[in-house]
Image (cartoon, grey):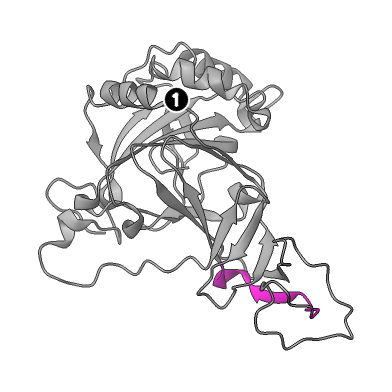
Amino acid sequence: MQAGTGGMQAAGGGGGPGCGCKGIRSCLLCEGPAPAAPPPQGEDNFTYCPATGLAKGNEHSEFAGWAFPFPGVFLVEEFISEDEECEIVELMDQDDWKPSQSGRKKQDYGPKVNFKKQRLKAGSFTGLPSFSRKIVAQMKACAVLSGFLPVEQCNLDYRPERGSAIDPHFDDWWLWGERLVSLNLLSQTVLSMSCDSQDTIQLFPISSKEELTPPAPSTQTSACRNPGEEGTECLLSPRQVPGKEVSVAILLPQRSLVVLHGDARYKWKHGIRRRHIQHRRVCITFRELSAEFCAGGRHEELGKELLQIALSFQGRPV
């Protein structure tokens, strides 16, 4: 979900002492002390509701009172305890963090990959770290993660003093499978979902019970200004908006686990804006193999080899 060995599909700036920025990307370390305006970050105009699976228009946006189904997100709060969180981060900090792009630092546990040439080998990969064995075992309690076998782990360190962020991107889907799993540690943040598609999104007004109002007959219209306001009795027809105008915020509490799959994996880019990193944040992202590397796939044997290494849980950062 976050870029590391994840094959982030997005553009490539900067570079400065102590940072790993390339191409157009930058952080506070390479932007320098000049009070120049930071890179544009955009605004989220919808917020995902885990209880309903809806993306609801934000109160002060033009989409207030409107919503649409947002499938493919699974969120578990307090996936691990506070003591477990402290222990995991302490173990991570015993290893070096390598500079990465946009003010992040990283630790990779995974095979050596050339995504452009679609080449893959085990390289110096020795497996996932020992502390991840328990995390992976706990995932089995989640139905959406049935059969999930992580073959790669990327730890990312975000800090406000570095201006850490990650641009909107898709994770590679030649190598990585459908489910992206991330554990959010040390502070809460916001995962921003955006769409470059030319397709339109159909919005529905929210009733006073925060449910989608069934579409009104096409012959009926309404000039109601507050369709989500309790007591409103007017009928509104669904509203069509360009997907490019929509950005959905997924709130990630500290110690929460989030899974992106289906539409949230393949139709929506995910990223984290600089302003949403207010304290140190550490993220662990697990990825599974695509069908090409699983049973019956073209590279089944290589997939088996990599999984055997990964699930030994004897790894060190590569």
Q: Residue at x 69, y 63 (%)?
A: 68
> Circle 1 is placed at which residue position?
121
**Quadrant housing the C terminus:** top left
User: What residue appears at the point 46 percent right and 10 percent down from the top-left corner?
Assistant: 312
Q: Position of residue 167 (x, y in %)?
A: 40, 56
Say if 184 sits above or below 220 in the image. above
Question: Magenta segment: does it hold 46?
Answer: no
Q: Position of residue 85 (x, y in %)?
A: 36, 27
Q: Amino acid at mark 1?
A: Lys
Q: Is residue 310 visible?
A: no
Report the magenta residues as a range.
Answer: 234-246
Q: How many marks?
A: 1
Residue depicted at 50% across the width and 45% down the height: 171
Q: For the view shown, which residue lies furthest in the front direction?
A: 231
Residue 2's spot in the image, x, y percent?
Answer: 43, 43
Q: What residue lies at 62% left-to-right and 55% top-to-bottom?
A: 267
Q: Quadrant of residue 299?
A: top right
Q: Place residue 187 in its image quadrant.
A: top left
Q: Nearer the viewer, residue 91 or 147?
A: 91
Q: Is residue 30 visible?
A: yes
Task: Locate residue 248, reporting x and y percent.
Answer: 54, 60
Q: Quadrant of residue 121?
A: top left
Relative to residue 179, is residue 238 drawn left or right? right
Q: 150 or 258, which is in the foreground?
A: 258
